[in-house]
Amino acid sequence: NKSLLAMLVCKIFAFKAKKIISISNTVKKYFSTGIISIDEKKIETIYYGIDKDYIDNITNNKKKIFLPKSKLIFGSVGRLVKQKNYEFIIKSFEKYCKIYNVNSILVIAGKGPEEKNLKRLVKELKLKNNIFFIGHLNNVANFLKQIDVFCMNSKFEGLGLVMLEAMAFGKPIIAPRISAIPEVIKDGVNGLLTKPDNINSYVNAMKKVQNYNFRKKLSKQNKLYLKNKFSFDKMISKTQNI
């Protein structure tokens, strides 16, 4: 959204295209308004679809991951870049630990240019025994199986495939009410939506998922929501129709 050349190329392709597939209604709105302003009738939203084969594929790596033992494990996967805003998650977790002092840890998987800054922040906050960085993963499934709650706090998301992966393993999700995230997370049904850039709101969500029965309820709804809204067969059918 900062490149005039990219916008020009986008306009040319959009003009020539008969139909454009968007991965979310948020992306559709972005491209049909503002400077780019593609004809909305040309754009159709088709959500990603996940099926058993996809899950088997991301589970395929036999290398085991052993996470530290804890009563409650918050986890996140992604590139360690500013857009993913891990600094916010770390600061929220720090406040959560101070207030509720429960046996919880936060495990972050991924590599990126922000890694040194984030590790420095964890050291400054004296949370080296509660927050762990485990680097890049080839086996996302093994990680998702072991955590209790999936956390994200991106500054923007076109959809967020990693949330669908977390849902496939029945993990409740905490994420901000921005971009396309509310198209994936229904607040109180399959996860919790927080106020953007509001640490107190994020901390309150972390407190709510301490309750095992509440997590179990969100987990059950997650798999149903995934099957109904992000079905692989539905994605293929809609794409073939176009």
Image (cartoon, rainbow, N blue to C red):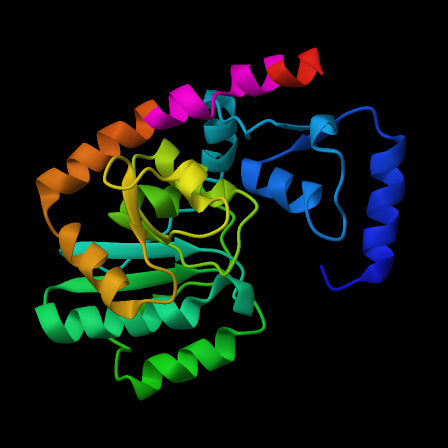
Residue 14 in view, yes or no: yes
Task: Using residue 153 as the reference point, say whether residue 6 is left or right of it.
Answer: right
Q: Quadrant of residue 62?
A: top left
Position of 56 relative to 183 (above/below): above
Position of 213 relative to 83 (above/below): above
Task: Using residue 83 as the reference point, say whether residue 177 is left or right of it.
Answer: left
Residue located 34% across and 79% down the image: 122
Report the magenta stretch's main SS. Answer: helix
Camera-side residue of 93 and 183: 183
Residue 16: x %, y % from top left: 90, 32
Q: Is residue 165 magenta?
A: no
Position of 213 relative to 54 (above/below): below
Camera-side residue of 120 and 178: 178
Residue located 33% across and 88% down the image: 124
Task: Using residue 76 as the reference point, say whether residue 158 is left or right of it.
Answer: right
Q: Is residue 230 magenta?
A: yes
Camera-side residue of 239 and 26: 26
Residue 166: x %, y % from top left: 38, 40
The C terminus: image quadrant: top right
Residue 231: x %, y % from top left: 48, 21
Q: What stretch is highlighted in magenta?
A: 225-237
Q: Quadrant of residue 79?
A: bottom right
The N terminus: image quadrant: bottom right
Task: Using residue 4 as the reference point, say whether residue 240 is left or right of it.
Answer: left
Residue 236: x %, y % from top left: 61, 17
Which residue is at the far bottom? 124
Position of 184 relative to 9 (above/below): above
Residue located 74% across and 44% down the image: 37
How many dots with numbers? 0
Residue located 57% across and 20% down the image: 235
Residue 69 in view, yes or no: no
